[in-house]
Amino acid sequence: MIEVKGLCFSYEPSKQVLKDINLKIRGAEVVSLLGPNGSGKTTLLKCINGLLKATSGDILINGLDLRRLKRKEIARHIAYVPQEHKTTFPYRVLDVVLLGRAPYIGLFSSPRSSDIDSAYDVLHSMGIDHFADRLYTHLSGGERKLVLIARALCSGAPTLILDEPTSNLDLRHQRDVLRIIKTISKSKGQGVLMTIHDLNLAMRVSDRVLLMKDGIIVKKGTPSEVLVKEQIEYAYGCEVSIFNIDGRGIIGLSL
């Protein structure tokens, strides 16, 4: 479990980006972090993952103070999938996924047979084992995203943090990515925290949502509790309409 208490962050003294953030991420749940561009979502993910140092407040990872953990120790608790990932080296997909085992492998050691088996198992469970010997640089954007999620799963970390896992993906790859995220969360008991811009997708896949505006979480709860007309319009500063289609709420812009 991840617990954030009173977290504040500033890139410079005169500009506070995150203000008194409080949240919990438990196992076997998908939590979506929502809000307009510039609301502090990616900054919050980087603070939780230790890539940025909070100005004040506490971050506890399974009861351990983040500030006392080394980078390799954090990686054993949290697997991070960034929004963008580029490499100029033509690594095989299997080698990219094996990087998820890095926190358990010595600096001058090679992956063990058990590490390689774990990588193959993850690729198989995601239905992309046929990617194993392909070059990562030759994959499409959607295929790369699946491989990065496989790398995160290969780490065995109990919490996954994903920054816009569906960005720039077509409909089929959005579906595939979100299905995998939902399935692994429930089957493996992993907690998932992700940012996502599509409110309708967030409504379908999330157990809880956190709505941010100007560095503050303005509302938290189930999708049906948070994604209501008044809250959405307040956070995003635009009018929306909510339609009921086949028993599901669909959020649309009022143009």
Image (spheres, grey):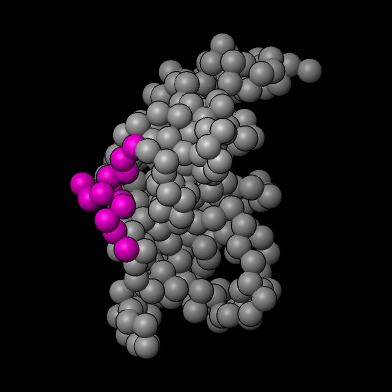
**Number of numbered markers:** 0
Which residue is at the front of the view, 11 or 172? 11
Which is more toward the observer, 240 or 35? Answer: 35
Depicted 203 relative to depicted 49: above or below: above
Quadrant position of the N terminus in the picture? top left
Residue 64 image offset from top left, x and y in percent: 22, 50
Residue in the image at 63% along x and 80% along y: 89
Would residue 230 appear left or right of 181 to someone viewing this image? right
| Residue 193 among those drawn in magenta | no
Nearest the camera: 130 or 58?
Answer: 58
Residue 239: image location, x then y, percent: 69, 14
Q: Quadrant of residue 86?
A: bottom right
| Residue 226, x across and y down, in percent | 47, 20
Q: Is residue 61 magenta?
A: yes
Residue drawn at x 35%, y 87% is 109
What's the magenta region?
57-70
Above or below for 130 versus 8? below
Give the residue at the far top of this rendering. 230
Q: Quadrant of residue 40?
A: top right
